[in-house]
Amino acid sequence: MKILLAGGSGQLAQELHPILLSSGEVIAVDRTRVDLSQPESIRQAMAQIQPDLVVNAGAYTAVDKAESEPELAHAVNGIAPGIFAEECEKLGASLIHFSTDYVFDGSHGSAYLETDSTNPLGTYGKSKLAGENAIRKAGNQHIIIRTAWVYGNYGKGNFVKTMLRLGKEREEIRVVADQIGSPTWTGDLATATAEIIPLLGLESFGTYQYTNSGVCSWYDLAIAIFEEAEKLGFPLKVQRVIPITTAEYPTPAKRPAFSVLSTVKISALLGTYPPHWRQGLRQMLVRELK
């Protein structure tokens, strides 16, 4: 099997690359080879590579910056996935694409199902929902995986790495405590993605959700990061973590207050529930700090 892995330099793609090798030949492309903001760049790469499977881990993920760059966010997140899906349809190939909890508005009181009404609050969420819809319009041979609160050992900008840096530099850190979700380690997400590949077929195509199990706030996650890092001997300066409200930390983009995603459907497909978020965090930190 020939697998085209898009977004090759991102934190998820770098985690996926070695794991996908067990499924076939992996051709990883980053923006220097395939510019996701340019449809023709995608079409040319698809024609040259002729993959059996596309795993699209590429995305515009700067949630706040998207508010001032809506055209670019929409090109990468809204249009490009549809182009991949169209080209897959021509080749008889399958597509695995990653979406987000931000397609929901966060007003739910229980975990969101794949079938619940979407209502994104900001440009990023709207662009990702447009990408989902473009894929569905283009054909049936796809799996869309919505995920949330993603962090990993690759890349610079994730929450866990930011907390480690701040924890080393500051005695006091203020963290939002009224946004609830499920942190997701790229190691677990990549493993689940690889487990889906042998199951690709008419029975399994559709929309799924995958996060680590359990829920917490960003404040809870920060506390857990420092507890686990301290056990591993990481030098921390932080003495106090202060819970604050979203209103006390205004950002250009509105974020869903509650974005827990149900993973019942994907668990039924894979025959196992995702590991707890604290377990994923521990594994990431062991790898990060060794």
Image: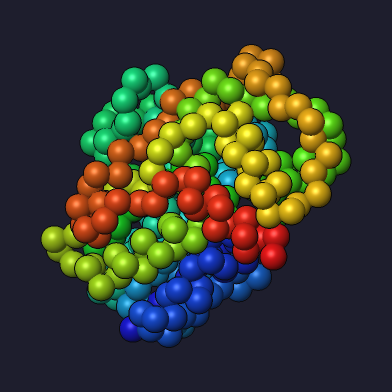
Quadrant of the rendered image containing residue 111: top left
| Residue 39 shows up from this direction | no
Horizontal side, residue 24 vs residue 200: left or right: right
| Residue 249, x across and y down, in percent | 69, 21
**Relative height, residue 284 to residue 167 (above, below):** below
| Residue 71, x across and y down, in percent | 58, 42
Quadrant in the picture for the C terminus: bottom right
Residue at 20%, 52% in the rendered image: 268
Horizontal side, residue 217 vs residue 192: left or right: right
**Relative height, residue 249 to residue 21 (above, below):** above
Quadrant in the picture for the N terminus: bottom left
| Residue 235 shows up from this direction | yes
Q: Nearer the viewer, residue 144 or 259?
A: 259
The outermost residue toward the left is 203
**Relative height, residue 189 to residue 31 (above, below):** above
Residue at 61%, 19% in the rendered image: 246
| Residue 225, x across and y down, in percent | 63, 43
Quadrant of the rendered image containing residue 43: bottom left
Q: Nearer the viewer, residue 276 or 175?
A: 276
Q: Nearer the viewer, residue 229 or 19?
A: 229
Horizontal side, residue 59 vs residue 248: left or right: left
Residue at 36%, 80% in the rendered image: 23
> Which scheme is used to colour this image of the protein?
rainbow
Q: Nearer the viewer, residue 73 or 187?
A: 187
| Residue 66, x across and y down, in percent | 62, 38
Q: How many marks?
A: 0
